[in-house]
């Protein structure tokens, strides 16, 4: 017997990040940096633009703001992808382009949720429908994401699928990095041959 799909909202809670312009600030408050595209792409094991720390947007909030913790699941509403926050990005603030997902661990394994959101046909179809008709920026809405559905396998299968998915994406990242380094070395040798 096949399980029926359940809405994401029944297996996880979703907390949106703060709109940057609505954060009250004070020059004497602690400086905080945002979890931005660079950090998100790194947590997805994707190459991204490296931004020097002095170019990052810094705020000094005087109110409680949402920050990420190691192991949090985060969805980028702009990229239509999910990632698990790495230790080096913990403590950064979430902007309104991101949503923290707290899965019910009795029903869903976080790594499986990331796989489902990023790769499953079930999720891809729902994301395509949610962004249909968008002309300029393909951005998911939090309301739509909460309504996405997932057919949940048993937790042991979720753990296996999620673990394999994360290991595979990490391996692909290192293979692509190695290929890029090999290409640079070959191009450098070719340049040396000309001189």
Image (tube, grey):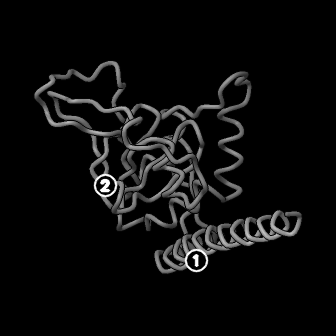
In the figure, 7 relative to 184: above or below? above
- Does residue 40 appear in the picture of this structure? yes
In the figure, 128 relative to 3: above or below? above
- Does residue 4 appear in the picture of this structure? no
Quadrant where the N terminus is found in the figure: bottom right
Say few, some or many: other residues with alpha carbon within 10 Å of mark 1 (under 14 / 14 to 19 / 20 or more). Answer: some
Q: Nearer the viewer, residue 46 or 94?
A: 46
Q: Nearer the viewer, residue 195 or 149?
A: 195
- Disc 2 element: loop
For label 2, the residue is 90
For label 1, the residue is 164
Residue 156 in the figure: left or right of residue 1:
left
Quadrant where the C terminus is found in the figure: bottom right
- Taking the spot 33% from the left edge, 62% from the top edge, the residue there is 87
Q: Nearer the viewer, residue 164 or 91?
A: 91
Say few, some or many: other residues with alpha carbon within 10 Å of mark 2 (under 14 / 14 to 19 / 20 or more). Answer: some
């Amino acid at each position: 017997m096949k399980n029926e799909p359940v809405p994401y909202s029944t297996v996880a809670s979703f907390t949106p990040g703060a709109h940057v312009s609505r954060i009250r600030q004070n020059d004497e408050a602690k400086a905080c940096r945002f979890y931005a595209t660079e950090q998100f792409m790194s947590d997805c094991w994707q190459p991204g633009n490296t931004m020097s720390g002095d170019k990052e947007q810094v705020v000094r909030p005087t109110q409680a703001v949402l920050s990420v913790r190691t192991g949090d699941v985060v969805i980028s509403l702009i990229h239509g992808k999910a990632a698990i926050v790495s230790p080096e990005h913990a403590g950064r603030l979430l902007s309104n382009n991101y949503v923290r997902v707290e899965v019910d661990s009795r029903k869903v394994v976080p790594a499986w949720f990331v796989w489902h959101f990023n790769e499953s046909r079930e999720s891809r179809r729902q994301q395509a429908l949610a962004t249909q008709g968008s002309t300029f920026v393909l951005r998911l809405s939090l309301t739509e994401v909460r309504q996405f559905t997932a057919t949940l396998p048993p937790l042991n299968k979720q753990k296996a699928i999620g673990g394999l998915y994360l290991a595979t994406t990490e391996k692909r990242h290192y293979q692509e990095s190695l290929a890029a380094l090999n290409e640079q070395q070959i191009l450098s040798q070719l340049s040396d041959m000309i001189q």
